[in-house]
Amino acid sequence: MRILLDTCTFLWIITDDSSLSAKARALFTASENEVFLSVVSSWEIAVKYKLGKLPLPESPAKYIPQKREQHEIDSLVLTEQAALYLSKLPDLHRDPFDRILICQAIVQGLCLLTPDELIIQYPVHSLW
């Protein structure tokens, strides 16, 4: 299975947060699954860090790639096709970062690993 991590899911994985469900942990650690972190999530983390809303032990420029590699998570680029899919997405969720993650999952055939109940209203295969 090809899995795209929601930003909060990635943060919970790298900090071993108890908010991560047992099912999500099992999906993430299953060796047969390919796991991705979108550059959009990296962007979101950098923005929140800069605004002082997300404390990190070091700058996102160092911390995120290091943790992504440590946990064997591949980086996922944002394609033009995924960006343009936004025009087809219903306005069920207002968070722009989550909306583009939804588009990426739909366009690239990925399962989105998220606890966000608004995301599961979209035509995306979501897991939690």
Image (spheres, rainbow, N blue to C red):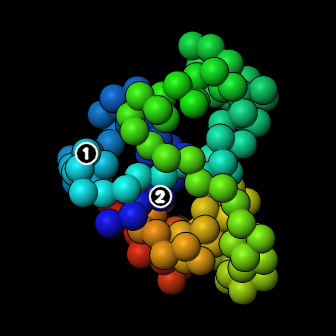
Q: Is residue 29 visible?
A: yes
At 49% from the left and 35% from the top, the residue drawn is 68
- Residue corresponding to mark 2: 4
From what the image shows, is residue 88 above or below residue 64?
A: below
Q: Badge 2, how many Cα within 10 Å: few under 14, some, many 20+?
A: many
From what the image shows, is residue 86 above or below residue 14?
A: below
Kindly state the secondary structure of the residue where label 2 is placed: strand
Q: Quadrant of residue 12?
A: top left
At 41% from the left and 75% from the top, the residue drawn is 125
* Residue 75 percent coordinates (x, y): 56, 47
Residue at the limit of the structure toward the top, as seen here = 57
Type of amino acid under label 2: Leu
Q: Badge 1, how many Cα within 10 Å: few under 14, some, many 20+?
A: some
At 32% from the left and 66% from the top, the residue drawn is 1
Type of amino acid under label 1: Thr
* Residue 127 percent coordinates (x, y): 35, 65
Q: Check whether the beta carbons of the residues at disc 1 and disc 2 lie within 8 A of each other.
A: no
- Residue corresponding to mark 1: 29
Given residues 4 and 127, the one toward you in this image is 4
State left or right for residue 38 relative to residue 125: right
What distance separates the C-alpha of mark 1 from that of mark 2? 13 Å
From what the image shows, is residue 73 above or below residue 1?
A: above
State left or right for residue 125 relative to residue 59: left
Residue 78 circle label: none
Q: Which image quarter holds the C terminus?
A: bottom left
Q: Earlier in the sequence, mark 1 or mark 2?
A: 2
* Residue 70 percent coordinates (x, y): 41, 28
Given residues 19 and 46, the one toward you in this image is 46
Q: Can residue 55 be seen in this view?
A: no
